[in-house]
Amino acid sequence: MGESRRRGSSEERLSTYRAKRRPDHTPEPGTRPALEEPAERWLPPDVFVVHQHAARRLHFDLRLALDGVLLSWAVPQGPSVDPSVKRLAVRTEDHPLEYADFEGVIPPGNYGAGSMILWDRGRWTAAEDPRRGLQEGKLLFDLYGQKLRGRWTLVRTKSGDWLWIKKKDIFARKDGSDLSPSSILSGCTVDELPQRGRALAERLAAIDLPPAPADLVARRTRPMLAETIDAPFTDPRWLFELKYDGYRLLVERDGSRVELRTRSHRDVTEAFPDLARLVRRLPAERFLLDGEVVVLDDQAHPRFQLLQRRSQSRAPRRVAQELPATYYAFDLLQIAGKDVRELPLEERKELLRLVVPPLGPVRFADHVRERGEAMFEQIRARNLEGLVAKRADAPYRGRRSKDWLKIPALREGTFTVLGYTLPKGSRSGVGSLHLGSPLAADGWAYAGRVGTGFSHRELQRVREQLDRYEREQPPLDPVPPSVNEKDTVWTEPRLHVRVRYLQWTEEGVLRMPRFAGWSDTPPDPICSTAPPAPEREASGPSSAASAAILERGMEPSNLEKIFWPEDGYTKGDLIEYHRKIAPHMLPWLADRPAVLARYPDGIEGKNFFQKNLPEFAPSWIRRVRIHSEHGDRDIDYPILEDLDSLLWAINMGSIPIHVWASRASSLERPDWLILDLDPKEAPFVHVVHLARAAKDLCDDLGIHGVCKTSGSTGLHVLVALGGALDYPQTQHLAMLLAKLLVRRHPDIATVDRALTARGGKVYVDALQNGPGKLLVAPYAVRARRGAPVSMPVPWSRVRSDLDPRRYDIKTAPKRAGGRKRDPFEGLLDDTLDLRAVLATLEDAFSKRTDGVSPSMDPGGFGAAGAAGGRGPRFSK
């Protein structure tokens, strides 16, 4: 059937679907639309689904929601995550939207008779106009499912059939055999579906269990609680689970009745209609689950603010589409009328696996046996909440018990908002919140500022709430000297926030704070304004620096080898430096592909770049596979996201660590844009002058720019993007900024790359903004005389007397630790208003007379969807 014949109303387009089905003989939806709940009430408009269908031949069905129907393709061999594999996809009749929720057995004698499981489901977004793509025979789109993610394409062949192909990105890999074969609704495979629940029934029949008492229901059961300890441990008798950032929920099903109740027994079933609907689909009629409900962000990390926003909505069905919930079931209390609380935890979880699927909106909360310390390091590196340890042989007790232990990865506290700073650049609402704790006597103890952890929408809401409590005089007396009152709006101390932080500094303010949500409960009073004792690192010789490596079975080598002959610095000194600087450096390495510059014999010996993680690298070092177009091969980049991984790389003789501008979880969307100010023969004072000019340009455009020394002879100016642009768009914008900077300062700046053409001017290098282009990581040491460090520098220090040589392997840790504010604060959280930036640039370039002119060609920024507008391209 030609694509043009598929147009028209959804009713017309579903005529073929309905003609092939008998309403009274098949459980499939859309055959009797008048009797069914409209899909728009509970399905997002951009839903996609993949069914596995054991009809006459086993196959998969890809379905994409568009214009009121599900476009459908039959895929005989199913999806492949290998970009070199092309799967045949045969276009079939459009299906009703309700089919995105269907799973069942189509009886014999009906069209498509056989079992069908919902193998995957999520959102899809078209990278190009989907209607035009369907007409022209090429559809490019992104999937955000439980199993399939990243970019895909459908291409129509001359025969009229289609090919479904995975595009090369971080979700592509050669071997996709680990894709789960089970349903995300029932956990059944397509073969198990006709006899769903049979394995559970057989398992229960083999166990002698008492009947569940009448009070073992969600509205009466007290959940088991954990004691808090400070440090993780390794023990084969324990199971370790992620500590989820959400609400504890007891979930009960009794036939068609489903109840979701909080720890305090509040009924929240109506607040989570999406979960209640899915609980009814599980392969058991009666059960009581214990678990936690969360809302996941784009990186599949639980975010309490998103859950809080959802729970405050008065439109639960609508918000369920915008912020779908995920329920992690980690325990089973009763099943099929039997009480299983006395069974060991390990056996309860084996039963639980037969009730809930491994993936999906209602899913099994998996665990790791024994390796609590290793799991904790991974959790901390990903900025997750913490770890829960549970004795594998423990029964379920409705009270707090030492059989369950929780180990927070980040500390958390409640603080009162005393005021806020005004936003700068493209940031809206507020810059950061001033925090305080009430004193037992009277007044407030200042706790510092928090400016990260807010979404754009949250910043607006924060400002709206704080504006109601504005006051002229500060509630603090005295105001700390670190507070710039010209930039501060004081407020009545009425609002309270939850904040996660790494530790307290010696000055008594929070280090690395992050907003975690609002609190209805004020903080407890404290007795003194004296700062809390900071959590100090253990002191000792450079051998102490290798403690983390030794714990993982890696013994550091050649600690006394001289790496900087003229300065006398050793490999041990290099390891010790990275141990000290790690709290400041690791945030710039987390989730980011890294490239090692290895100097195994010191800076005067042979050296080489290493992108591919060697085969002998420890298995606990995270890696991300990226296809290299240049070499037509896959590269396993290391991700140095924790202290162990970082020290392993340094022990390998790595001196500067280079990183991508984008993260492994969003590889095509860089976090920053870089302008590399390279002097070569130009005086350094010109570099400083241009850096200040770049700061002025950023201010004019309303964008957030920061500066760091390169560790060599120049400076790096980084501009926060927040993932608003892809790499080609970032390159366009970088070159526009560079050309505008040169236009303002033609006497000292140039964009000519060739040394002979620079004429003694500073080269403004905007070409380091493509995929795979590298940045010397903040706080990285350079392989140069003096062991200089690439150091973030506050704009107040970027002046004529700036001397990058002040920042070296000896001075950088003390300077970084003594700062009251991180010069790069907000760089990873701020984004830019692309429309406003492009409008300002267009106005600036429209006044040019030197041959560089803007063109409203959408190839430059038109795909920057975040802005929704078109932007200029440069031409010359």
Image (cartoon, helix red, strand yellow):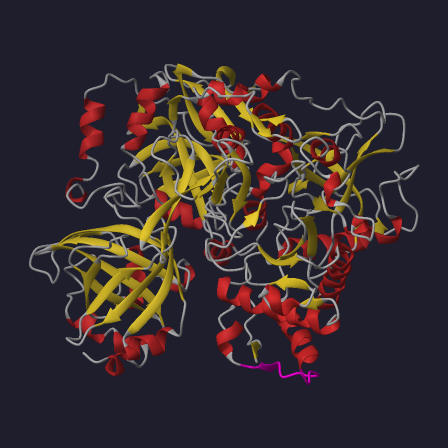
Q: Nearer the viewer, residue 355 or 782?
A: 782
The location of residue 370, given as percent across then percent down, is 39, 19
Say which quarter of the image contains residue 143.
Answer: bottom left
Report the quarter where the N terminus lies.
bottom left
Magenta span contains residue 347: no
Image vertical order of residue 225 relative to residue 808, above or below: above
Q: Nearer the viewer, residue 516 or 842?
A: 842
The magenta segment is 846-856
Magenta highlight: main SS: loop
The location of residue 867, given as percent across then percent down, is 57, 69
Q: Is residue 114 left or right of residue 770?
A: left
Q: Tell me which residue sits at (69%, 70%) in the image.
A: 742
Image vertical order of residue 231 relative to residue 90, above or below: above
Report the quarter where the C terminus lies.
bottom right
Say which quarter of the image contains residue 539.
Answer: top right
Q: Is residue 492 left or right of residue 570?
A: right
> Is residue 379 visible from the viewing direction of this image?
yes
Q: Is residue 113 left or right of residue 250?
A: left
The location of residue 281, given as percent across then percent down, is 30, 45
Q: Tell me which residue sits at (58%, 23%) in the image.
A: 572
Image vertical order of residue 830 relative to residue 821, above or below: below
Q: Is residue 631 left or right of residue 440?
A: left
Magenta span contains residue 847: yes
The location of residue 650, given as percent across then percent down, is 52, 31
